[in-house]
Image (cartoon, helix red, strand yellow):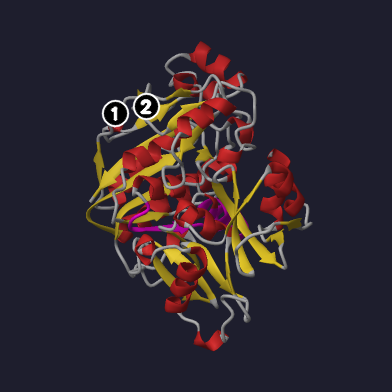
Amino acid sequence: MPGSQNREEIDTEDVLNYINNRFGVKVEDLDKFNIVERSGDFWLISDQELPDLDYETQGVRFVRDTGKYLKPTTYGLQILDEKISGARIQVNREELKTVLDGDMVEKEMEIGEGYVAIVYEERVVGCGLYKDGLLSSRIPKGRGKELNDMI
Amino acid sequence: MQRYKQIIDNWKQFQKECKRQERKTVRKNPIKSSEGFEQKLENDFPDVEQADWNQNIYRLNSEKSAGKSMLHWLGEYYVQEESAALPVQILDPEPGEKVLDMCAAPGGKTTQIASKMDNKGTVIANDKNPKRLKSLHANIYRTGSTAANVVNYDGRRIPKKVKYDKILVDAPCSGEGNNSRRNFKSASEQELRTLSNIQQKLLENAEKLLKEDGRIVYSTCTFAPEENESVVEKTLENTDLRLENIESDIEHVRGVKKFQETEFSFQTSKTVRVYPHHMRSGGIYVARFTK
C-alpha cells in the first residue's frame, strides 16, 4: 500500500514525498507550513521557531504513522483541499451517508489502493480508504456523525 | 443586576435586552472559507447581514442553529458572540508575531487571532483546565489554525523563557454579561474577591512575558467594576504597564469613574464597556496596556 514504510526510517521528507506522490500536492503548496514530528505523528505548523514550552499540541495533526502506513488526517486533507489533485474520490449525498454509517461504497476508479480524499460538493471533507474497488470512511467517528446528521 | 443601575447608560433598555435572546452571530474564518462564502451563508441564513465594524462578523437574524451547517463543520466560520470579537480586534495581532492567549479555551479568540495573523506566526494558546483542552484542540483543528499551539499551564505561572509581541488576557470572570452562563445574575462578594485576585495575578505575569512596546489586552464578560476597573487600577499600581486609549466604532460606554464608594484614580475613559443593549450581544469590558 502506498505510504507503507519502515517506521524507523520515516521523517518529514518521507511525509512530503507521500503527500506529493499520493495526493499530487506540490511541494511549494506546503511551503507556508512546517512539518514537525511529535510522538510519531507529523504536524502542520506555521512557525518552526516555537518557544521552548511543554506543548500539548503544535498546529494541526497532519499525518499519522500507524507503524505500517502513513495515514493523512481528515483535518490535514481539509487544509490542503483544492491543492489535492490525486487520490480524490467524489461522492454524492447517498454515498457519503453510506460511508459515514460505516459501510462501503463501490467505486470504479483509476486510483491505487490506499488513503484518499473524500470530496463532497467540491470540498474535501476528509480521509477515506480505497481498497478492492471499495471506499470506506476514515473520518473520525464523532465528526462523521455530525456531518451525517447535517447532510 | 440592580447594583449596576447607576452605571448602566440606559437601564430600561438594558433590562429589556437581558430578557431577550441574544442575536446569533458568526465570524468568518478566512483560513478555511472558500470562494462564494457570503452566498453560501445567505443560502443557509437568508436574513444574514454583515457587521459594519468588523467585516468578518455576520449577524444571522435567524432561529436556525449556526452550529449545524456544513460551513461550520468545515471551519469556514466560527460561532461567536458579536461582542466577544472585540478584544482581538483591539489586540490587532499581525502576521509573523508571537502572541499569547493566556486563557484560551474553547478557542474562539485563539482562532480569531490566527485568522487575523493570516495563520502566519505563532499563537501560544494556553489554558489551565485540562478538561477544556479538548474543545480548544477541536476548534483549532476545525478552523485549520496551524499557527496555534496548545500549552497547559496555570496562566499565573507560564514560564518566562520567551517574550511576546502581544498578549490577550481574556480572564476567567463571573460572566455576568453572558446570558448563557448565568442568566445575567450578579456574582457574590466572595466570588468577586477570588476572581479579581486571579485576574490581577494573570495581568502581573502577562507584564513579565511582554516585550518592550508590546501590547496586552485585558477583557472580561462581566459588569462588575471589581473585576474590571479595580483590576486595571491595581495593575497600573503594581506594574510598569501603561494604559492606552481604545478607539472603537461600536456602540459602547467608557469605563466607570466611580462605583458605590470606590472612586478610581486612573483614566477609566480609556477603557471600554459594551452592554447587551449596545449590540444585542453579551456584555464585555476591554482595557489595553503597553509597556
Disc 1 residue crowd, few under 14, some 14–19, many 20+, Cα 10 Å: some
Residue B104 % position (x, y):
48, 52
Secondary structure type for disc 2: strand
Subunit bearing disc 1: B
**Tags 1 and 2 both on a single chain:** yes
Give the amino acid at mark 2. Answer: Lys
Q: Nearer the viewer, residue B228 or B58?
A: B58
SS label for mark 1: helix
Cα separation between marks 1 and 2: 11 Å
The part of the image, by quadrant, that contains residue A150 is top right
Near-viewer residue (A99 or B30): A99
- Give, as a single range, the part of the protein colored magenta: B119-141
Q: In the rendering, at what x and y percent does residue B264 appear? A: 33, 33
Q: Nearer the viewer, residue B232 or B237?
A: B232
Alpha-carbon neighbours of circle 2 within 10 Å: few (<14), some, or many (≥20)?
some
Callout 2: residue from which chain? B
Can residue B282 be seen?
no
Residue A89 found in image quarter: bottom right
Q: In the picture provided, is B132 more to the left or to the right than B80?
A: right
Q: Is residue B124 magenta?
A: yes
Q: Is residue B275 above or below residue B159?
A: above
Instruction: Name the residue located 53 percent from the left edge and 45 percent from the top edge.
Output: B75
Query: Residue A110 in magenta?
Result: no
Q: Earlier in the sequence, mark 1 or mark 2?
A: 2
Q: Which residue is mark 2?
A: B258
